[in-house]
Image (spheres, rainbow, N blue to C red):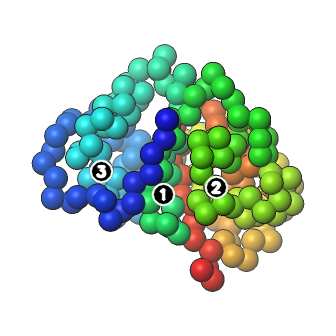
Amino acid sequence: MSLIIPLTDINPNHTKDIELEPELSLFVKSSQWPQEIQALFFDFLYSNVEHASKLNLLFSNTDFLHQCIPLIAYSELIESFIIIYSDQTQEPPEPGEPGSVLSYFRSYGYGENVLCSDCYGQLSCSSCSVEVHNGIPENKEPRDEEYDMLDIDNEKPATEFSRLSCQTLVGKTPLILTIRKPINS
Ligand code: FES
C-alpha cells in the first residue's frame, strides 16, 4: 500500500482529529526535513485519521513495524509526500540491490517522474540519489563506489545525507527521505 499527497491537497486549517504517538512525532521532529516540510506533514497527519492511525500503530508496535517499514518521502520536484508501507515479507529484487529504496519505489508503482534510475540500478549514474533525513538503512555506510558516484553529481550535489537509492537497503527502521530537485530543473 502506498499513497502520494500533493502539498496542494493538504489543508492547513484542519481540526486536530487524532493524537500522534510520541515515537512518530519525535521521528518527524528529529528529522533533517526543513521546519516547513515537517509542519506540512503534521498538517497531513492531523487531518487524515486513516494514515495517522496506521503510522501510530507501526511506530508504537515493533512487531507490526518489522512486517511493514514505512518509507516517508518528500519530492521537491513534484512537491508531494509519498508514503510507502513496505511489505517486508516480499522484498523486491530490482532495480539495484534487492530490497533497495529504489526497488520499493518501483514495486509500489512510482516511476522515473518520481525517482530516476538512468542506469537501472547498476551503480553507474547518480540520478537515483536521495537524502536520508531520518532512520537507519540496513547498510548504514555507502560503499566507496557509491561515494564515487555521489561525488560527481552536478545536478544534485551530494550532502552528508545523500545516498544512491538503488544501493540503500531498507532496514529495520522507518525512513524519512527527500528526493531533491536537480538544480537545473
Ligand atoms: S540508478 Fe544509476 S546508480 Fe542508482
Q: Which residue lies furthest to the left in this view?
A: 15
Q: Where is residue 105 in the image (x, y as percent from the top left)?
A: 62, 46
On residue 74, the disc is: 1
- Residue 162 seen anywhere in this rendered image of the structure: no
**Which badge, 1 or 3, comes first in the chain's sequence?**
3
**How would you rate the neighbour count of disc 3 (Cα within 10 Å): few for under 14, some for 14-19, many for 20 or more?**
many
Q: Is mark 1 on a helix, strand or loop?
A: strand
**How would you rate the neighbour count of disc 2 (Cα within 10 Å): few for under 14, some for 14-19, many for 20 or more?**
few
Amino acid under label 3? Phe
* Image position of 167 with respect to 127: above or below: above
In the picture of the structure, the residue carrying the numbered disc 2 is 111
Q: Position of residue 136 (x, y in %)?
A: 59, 39
Is residue 184 rendered to the left or right of residue 8? right
Corner quadrant of residue 116: bottom right
Q: Position of residue 173 (x, y in %)?
A: 54, 33
Amino acid under label 1? Tyr
